[in-house]
Amino acid sequence: MGRKPQDVTDAELAVLKVLWNSGSATIRRITDELYPRQSESDYATVKKLLARLERKRFVTRNRKQMAHTFQARLTRDQLLGQRLEGLANNLCDGSSIPLLMHLVQKGKISTKQRQQLRALIRKLSDDTGSGRRTI
């Protein structure tokens, strides 16, 4: 059985969101963004969160300058995929269909989003000939 991917806490997710929006940032910049009325303990908190994210291999650190910069190693979509796959595995015995059906039926889906879903289903159906899965 493969190694279960690590998840991120809400506080770590807040740091990742800053990195996704900015591309890369220093500890000070992330602290400024997350804690506008910051204290030294806020800076220490962000530093600790970045160390945990680096250990989990969710961020990289550039040590070339005096103020190290950090960058997310995974995209928002990659994290979303990990979390949704985890939900499907834990709640739906590995099937993503109940999860997808619930999101579509209960969510407020715009006309544009429905068109995007239809296009995705068509694309996946068209890819059947190349050995890819369909829904």
Image (spheres, rainbow, N blue to C red):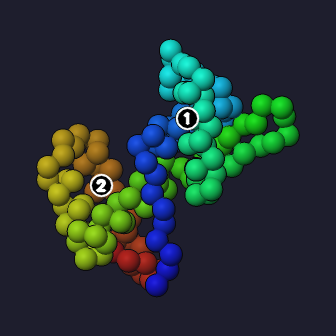
Position of the C terminus, as image quadrant, is: bottom left
Q: Residue furthest top?
A: 37
Residue 26 spot, x, y in % from top left? 68, 31
Q: Amino acid at mark 1?
A: Thr
Tell me the residue that label 2 is attached to. Answer: 117
Spatial CA span between label 2 and label 1: 40 Å
Dividing the picture into quadrants, the one containing residue 40 is: top right
The disc, 2 or 1, on the residue closer to the chain's N-terminal end is 1
Give me the residue at 43% from left, 48% from top.
9
Q: Is residue 33 above or below residue 116?
A: above
Q: Amino acid at mark 2?
A: Leu
Q: Is residue 3 above or below residue 55?
A: below
Q: Residue furthest front?
A: 41
Give me the residue at 72% from left, 45% from top.
61
- Disc sitting over residue 45 in the figure: 1
Give me the residue at 50% from left, 75% from top.
3
Q: As drawn, is 124 to the left or to the right of 71?
A: left
Give me the residue at 50% from left, 26% from top.
34
- Mark 2 lies on a secondary structure that is helix
Q: As drawn, is 95 to the left or to the right of 24?
A: left
Q: Nearer the viewer, residue 88 or 44?
A: 44
- Mark 1 lies on a secondary structure that is helix
Q: Nearer the viewer, residue 50 or 107?
A: 50
Q: Nearer the viewer, residue 115 or 110?
A: 110
Q: Label 1 crowding class (10 Å Cα cut-off): few <14, some 14-19, many 20+?
A: some
- Disc sitting over residue 106 in the figure: none
Q: Label 2 crowding class (10 Å Cα cut-off): few <14, some 14-19, many 20+?
A: some
2 or 1: mark nearer the eye? 1
Residue 54 spot, x, y in % from top left? 63, 51
Q: How many marks?
A: 2
Residue 88 spot, x, y in % from top left? 29, 68
